[in-house]
Image (cartoon, rainbow, N blue to C red):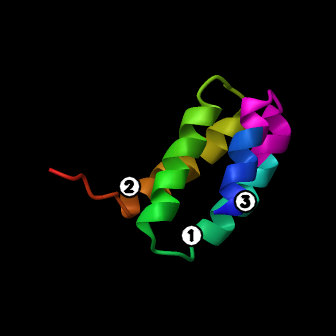
Amino acid sequence: MDRIGLAAALFDEGEAERGAGAAQQALDEAARVDSTLVTSRLNTLLHAARPYETAAVNDVRTRANGLAAAHPTPVAA
């Protein structure tokens, strides 16, 4: 989760390429974990990456969306 947070922070600071690199590493780790908290953090990452339209960020977005869809967070009623 810390790696996801780091990637999101890099995106928030305008470091799109560094954020994408950190995000790819974070997604490698996240793929091995089945956790609603990780899925929630993936949504934070996706939000932070929204302003960027580069190939590297689009790859991150595709992977993160896939992981988030595979492990949706429960919605409280």
Distance between mark 3 and mark 1 Cα atoms = 13 Å
Can residue 34 be found in the magenta stretch?
Answer: no
Question: Of helix, strand and loop, which one carries label 2?
Answer: helix
- Dominant secondary structure of the residues highlighted in magenta in the image: helix
Range of residues picked out in magenta? 10-20
Crowding at dot 1, Cα within 10 Å, few <14 / some 14-19 / many 20+, comes out as some
Tell me, for residue 65, which label it has, or none. none
Q: Residue at x 73, y 35 (%)?
A: 11
Q: What x and y, as percent, mark residue 62?
A: 55, 46
Question: Of helix, strand and loop, which one carries label 1?
Answer: loop
- Would residue 64 be found to the left or right of residue 74 on screen? right
Q: Residue at x 55, y 40 (%)?
A: 46
User: Hey, what amino acid is under mark 2?
Assistant: Ala
Q: Which residue corresponds to mark 3?
A: 3
Vertical relation: 27 (above or below) 7: below
Nearer the camera: disc 3 or disc 1: 3
Distance between mark 2 and mark 3 Cα atoms = 20 Å
Q: What x and y, as percent, mark residue 3?
A: 72, 59
Can residue 19 be found in the magenta stretch?
Answer: yes
Question: Of helix, strand and loop, which one carries label 3?
Answer: helix
Q: Residue at x 66, y 70 (%)?
A: 29
Q: Residue at x 55, y 43 (%)?
A: 44
User: Hey, what amino acid is under mark 3?
Assistant: Arg
Q: Which residue corresponds to mark 2?
A: 69
Does label 1 or label 2 sit earlier along the sequence? Answer: 1
Q: Which residue corresponds to mark 1?
A: 31
Q: Quadrant of the N terminus?
A: bottom right
Residue 62 vs residue 33, the one in the foreground = 33
Residue 2 vs residue 66, the one in the foreground = 2
> Is disc 2 in contact with disc 3, using a CB cutoff of under 8 Å?
no
Does label 3 or label 1 sit earlier along the sequence? Answer: 3
